[in-house]
Image (tube, helix red, strand yellow):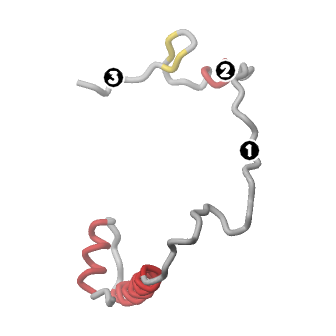
Amino acid sequence: MSVSEDEVRRIAKLARLRLTDGEIRLYGGQLTKILDAMAELGTLDTAKTPPTASVLGAVDVLREDEPRLFAGRERILDNAPDRDGPYFKVRKVIE
């Protein structure tokens, strides 16, 4: 699948990017390669392949979430532009 320069310009406009003509040609080629690779992957039979998040066999090394008191709350609240007791006070954003 080939990505035209007009399509790259349209994508760049949607992403609010200013691209030079050289960048448009470069990114067009890169997007074409990505889409071709995705099309090739779409032809493979993955019915017997289990879902995975990592091919490295990594395990979750994060600790369990345990609520605990935070000793530096006052220091953080001292930086607040406005506060109401132990809370940050912010402008109302809902009309």
Q: Which residue is mark 2?
A: 73
Q: Nearer the viewer, mark 3 or mark 1?
A: 1
Quarter of the figure that contains the N terminus:
bottom left
Which residue is drawn at the image coordinates 23% and 83% (left, top)?
6
**Kind of residue at badge 3:** Lys
- Label 3 Cα crowd, 10 Å radius (few <14 / some 14-19 / many 20+): few
Contact, mark 3 vs mark 2 (Cβ under 8 Å)? no
Instruction: Say which of 19 and 46 sits in front.
Output: 46
Judged left or right of residue 3, residue 66 is right
Q: Earlier in the sequence, mark 3 or mark 1?
A: 1
Q: Which residue is mark 3?
A: 92
Quarter of the figure that contains the C terminus:
top left
Q: Nearer the viewer, mark 1 or mark 2?
A: 1
As helix, strand or loop, the secondary structure at mark 1 comes to loop
As helix, strand or loop, the secondary structure at mark 2 comes to helix
Q: Is residue 11 above or below residue 69?
A: below
Q: Earlier in the sequence, mark 1 or mark 2?
A: 1
Q: Is residue 76 above or below residue 3?
A: above
Instruction: Say which of 34 and 29 sits in front.
Output: 34
